[in-house]
Image (cartoon, rainbow, N blue to C red):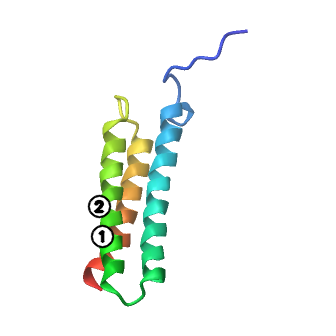
Amino acid sequence: MSEPSHSEIGEPIDRPSIYRTLLIAFLIWSAHFALSYAGVLVFPDDGIARIIAISAGLIAIAALVVAVRRLPAPRSPLALGALGLAGAGVIFGTFPALVG
């Protein structure tokens, strides 16, 4: 029997860095949503809820950028797609705080 390899060989979905990236991307997105929603629940009809949502959005985008930069080369399209989807979710989740 051969020993399990811990390298990044194989199909993209089989690589551990892809799983980590998928998990990190959607955790950042969900944390942003939870913070923004909590801000509106705790401070309804108040300007501080907007500040919370915008701050959470900026922090989430910064965390996603860090996650992209930490991806090993060559970067997987699956991982970049997950990070892009999470980024779009954060931006569109923050947008109502900017215009509303």
Q: How many residues crowd around disc 1 within 10 Å: few (fewer than 14), some, or many (20 or more)?
A: many
- Identify the image quadrant of residue 51: bottom left
Q: How many numbered discs?
A: 2
Q: CA distance from mark 2 to mark 1?
A: 6 Å
State the residue position of label 2. Answer: 58
Please determine whether, in this image, residue 100 is positioned above or below residue 74: below
Residue 79 is left or right of residue 55, and the answer is right
Q: Is residue 1 above or below residue 46?
A: above
**Quadrant of the snapshot with the C terminus:** bottom left
Give residue 82's position: percent from left, percent from top: 43, 50
Asked whether the beta carbons under mark 2 and mark 1 sit within 8 Å of each other, the answer is yes
Residue 81 lies, with reference to residue 74, above or below; the image says: below
Q: Nearer the viewer, residue 68 or 35?
A: 35
Question: What kind of residue is marked 1?
Answer: Ile
Which quadrant holds the N terminus? top right
Residue topped by disc 1: 54
Residue at (56% x, 32% y) in the render: 14
Please tell me whether mark 1 sits on a helix, a strand or a loop.
helix
Q: Amino acid at mark 2?
A: Leu
Residue 90, given in percent of the width and then of the height, sits at 37, 64
Residue at x-position 35% and y-position 72%: 53
- Residue 96 in view, yes or no: no
**Residue 33 placement: quadrant:** bottom left
> At numbered mark 2, what does the secondary structure look like: helix, strand or loop?
helix
User: Which class describes the residues within 10 Å of circle 2: few (<14), some (14-19), or many (20+)?
Assistant: some
What mark, if any, has residue 95 been given in the picture? none
Pinpoint residue 16: horizontal percent, then vertical percent.
53, 32
Q: Is residue 69 visible?
A: yes
The residue positioned 47% from the left and 47% from the top of the image is: 24
Q: Position of residue 91 (x, y in %)?
A: 32, 66
